[in-house]
Image (tube, helix red, strand yellow):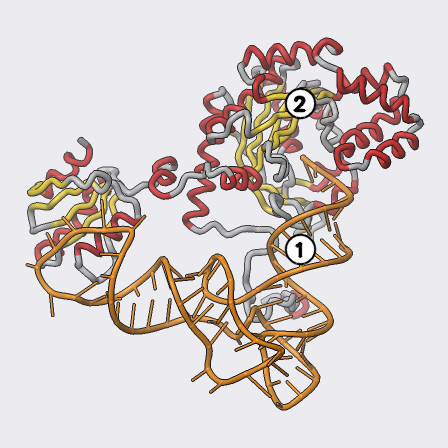
RNA sequence: GCGGCCGUAGCUCAGUUGGUUAGAGCACCUGGUUGUGGUCCAGGGGGUCGGGGGUUCAAAUCCCCUCGGUCGCCCCA
């Protein structure tokens, strides 16, 4: 027995009086249908990444708190779920993103890994922010990265993987836009305008916020940074017109996107800078064109990060796609499969639903037949209800989306019914059912 | 973390100026006794009206707090 003072404190009455237990704010329960939809998304992510030549990895769901503060400063702590073991002195945090873990993993083995490193992962992440539409406290994310290749070819290859997934979900290039920015290209324009390097951060922040600001406020902010309205217009024009020709890397990226066949999905837009400080080159954001939802995915190049975590200098580019906004978009567009189609896609559809006609010998044959089918690798189900009304049981068979129903007629034979076509095959021997099903 | 809006069965909602045992559809369950599928018929379970406190003879209905959702700000990896 622990001493009195080490017992758990009284639970704080947090207002959940009548219903003491519910999922924490911003976290979700996944009932079978929800789970099937989630699985559909995960499967599509995995298949796409594998098809594009990426290997799957994962890391811990919690890390040392420092891993996140090193990169983003102390301010980030408010947005993390961090904790300390009772009596311990080490601070941990649930992972809010994958990139630091990835950089750590690569840094640890960088010298022994053949380049380029093409890795992906699917996992859950946690952020202690206020939940909103498209933004929860626990969510799933698909992370895809290419390390050890600094070329625009790698950027394009990564973007192609992202597009491949979107396409696989049934989305098209008129429903989705990948807007691609480029920090290095923007910086070269900054240099042309003789902006002090120490101000780049503020300028990036201003460009990032531009779509949200009133024109007057935008001009105002620019003045604060030392630009009058005329100069600001020149800068805007330079950014707007910065196409392929103004920057070598941007230009080769554009041609690589063309070669990879994804240019119909992309738009070069140098006002895309993204919030993260660690991006160094290309950055991109994926939105649905309706403009109502948050970003579906985002990413970019982060050539210094592995080094920052103690590894050898390693160029890297990656993106993440979250399940929350993606699900909303798929629902909005009617692209989330349901019923038999959904179960088919995740390989969870029952092959066969067995029904006894209620006679004693049929009843006796039911369980052994089910067992045999399952041993043969088939997905076999039967009712747990008491009724032997064939009509009701067929309804049950059909509502669980089984491909076939079997009505056991006696100790030796059954009727095999295709639930999609309605075709029936009578007098099928029970002991030949496995062969019948596999054939 | 800050502000606006919302909260009645699993889901979509109704509930009259606060007034008797809180309703419908769908879903779910059980029957319709030898048989064929999201139709029929008949029954049934399920809500302390998000929770707590207050005002009142009386509250789902008014007030406060709280929890949750949603929208905006911050942030967005």
Question: Within the image, what quadrant is residue A336 found in?
Answer: top left
Which numbered disc flags the more N-terminal residue, 2 or 1?
1
Task: Give the crowd class for mark 1: few <14, some 14-19, many >=20 residues within 10 Å.
Answer: few
In this picture, residue A232 sits left or right of residue A264: right
Residue matched to label 2 = A180
Residue at left offset 27%, top offset 44%:
A402
Quarter of the figure with the N terminus of chain A: bottom right
The local secondary structure at tag 2 comes to strand
Question: Within the image, what quadrant is residue A376 found in?
Answer: top left
A21 lies above or below A93: below
Residue matched to label 1 = A86
In this picture, residue A324 sits left or right of residue B66: left
Chain at tag 2: A
Residue at left offset 63%, top offset 41%:
A95
In this picture, residue A364 sits left or right of residue B39: left
A93 lies above or below A179: below
Residue A329 badge: none
Where does residue A310 sit, x and y in percent of width and height?
71, 25
Query: Is A436 or A314 nearer to us in this picture?
Result: A436
């Amino acid at each position: 027995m622990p001493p009195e003072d080490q017992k758990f404190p009284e639970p704080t009455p947090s207002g959940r009086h009548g219903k003491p237990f519910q999922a924490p704010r911003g976290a979700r329960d996944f009932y079978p249908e929800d789970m099937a939809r989630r699985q559909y998304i995960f499967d599509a992510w995995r298949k796409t990444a594998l098809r594009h030549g990426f290997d799957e990895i994962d890391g811990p769901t919690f890390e040392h708190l420092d891993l996140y503060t090193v990169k983003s400063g102390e301010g980030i702590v408010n947005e993390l779920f961090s904790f300390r073991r009772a009596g311990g002195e080490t601070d941990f945090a649930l992972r809010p993103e994958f990139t630091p873990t990835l950089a750590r993993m690569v840094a640890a083995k960088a010298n022994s890994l053949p380049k380029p490193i093409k890795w992906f992962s699917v996992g859950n992440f946690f952020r202690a922010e206020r939940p909103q539409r498209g933004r929860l406290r626990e969510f799933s994310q698909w992370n895809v990265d290419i390390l050890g290749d600094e070329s625009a070819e790698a950027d394009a290859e990564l973007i192609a993987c992202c597009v491949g997934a979107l396409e696989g979900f049934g989305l098209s290039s008129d429903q989705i836009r990948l807007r691609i920015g480029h920090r290095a290209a923007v910086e070269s324009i900054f240099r042309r305008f003789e902006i002090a390097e120490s101000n780049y951060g503020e300028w990036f922040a201003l460009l990032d916020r531009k779509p949200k600001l009133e024109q007057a406020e935008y001009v105002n902010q620019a003045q604060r940074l030392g630009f009058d309205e005329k100069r600001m217009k020149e800068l805007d024009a330079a950014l707007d017109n910065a196409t392929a020709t103004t920057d070598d890397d941007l230009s080769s990226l554009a041609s690589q996107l063309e070669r990879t066949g994804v240019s119909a999905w992309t738009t070069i837009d140098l006002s895309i800078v993204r919030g993260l400080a660690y991006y160094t080159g290309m950055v991109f954001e994926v939105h649905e064109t309706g403009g109502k939802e948050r970003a579906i995915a985002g990413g970019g190049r982060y050539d210094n990060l592995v080094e920052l975590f103690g590894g050898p200098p390693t160029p890297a580019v990656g993106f993440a796609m979250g399940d929350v906004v993606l699900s909303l978009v798929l629902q909005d567009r009617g692209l989330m499969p349901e019923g038999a189609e959904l179960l088919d896609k995740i390989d969870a559809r029952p092959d066969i639903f067995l029904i006894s006609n209620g006679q004693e010998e049929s009843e006796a044959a039911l369980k052994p037949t089910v067992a045999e089918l399952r041993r043969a690798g088939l997905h076999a189900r039967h009712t747990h209800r008491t009724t032997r009304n064939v009509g009701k049981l067929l309804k049950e068979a059909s509502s669980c989306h089984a491909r076939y129903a079997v009505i056991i007629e006696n100790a030796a034979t059954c009727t095999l019914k295709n639930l999609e076509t309605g075709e029936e095959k009578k007098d099928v021997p029970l002991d030949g059912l496995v062969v019948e099903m596999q054939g």
